[in-house]
Image (cartoon, helix red, strand yellow):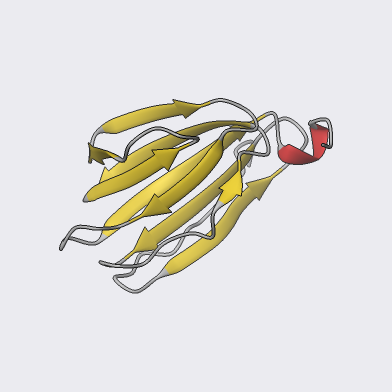
Amino acid sequence: MIEKLYPFTLAESKIIERVLDEDAIAINHMILPQGDRLPEHDANSHVYMIVSRGTITLQLDDQEEHHYDAGSILNIPFRTHMNVINTHEETVELFVVKVPGPRSMPKP
């Protein structure tokens, strides 16, 4: 088999899982029901968020909150302060792609 499989969980409850973690790329899969959030943090790589279900609310650095629907791909620069929350009724599902993987990035 040439290809390599990276399974992820299908669910309705909160999930934050690392799907792939390599020097070149890292991929996380997240499911956030209404009111769930990630801890506030700084982006530890160049981040691409792929919203596959629901609407995610992001507050980056000193900006006001913005809302992004399923079908959106967001690019968040390295070291941007992030506040990620599901403020909407529908469950949010997203993939977070980090390029390169955080272990290849300079430490603060």
Q: Residue at x 37, y 43 (%)?
A: 58
Q: Quadrant of the N terminus?
A: top right
- On screen, 38 above or below 84? below
Q: Quadrant of the C terminus?
A: top right
Q: Nearer the viewer, residue 38 or 15?
A: 38
- On screen, 48 above or below 90? above
Give x and y (percent) for residue 18. Answer: 60, 56
Residue 18 is left or right of residue 101, and the answer is: left
Q: Residue at x 81, y 32 (%)?
A: 104
Which of the 4 image quarters holds residue 77?
A: top right
Q: Residue at x 84, y 37 (%)?
A: 107
Furthest residue in direction front, as rendered? 62
Residue 105 is left or right of residue 93, and the answer is: right
Which of the 4 image quarters holds residue 31?
A: bottom left
Give x and y (percent) for residue 85. Answer: 36, 56
Give x and y (percent) for residue 24. Answer: 72, 30
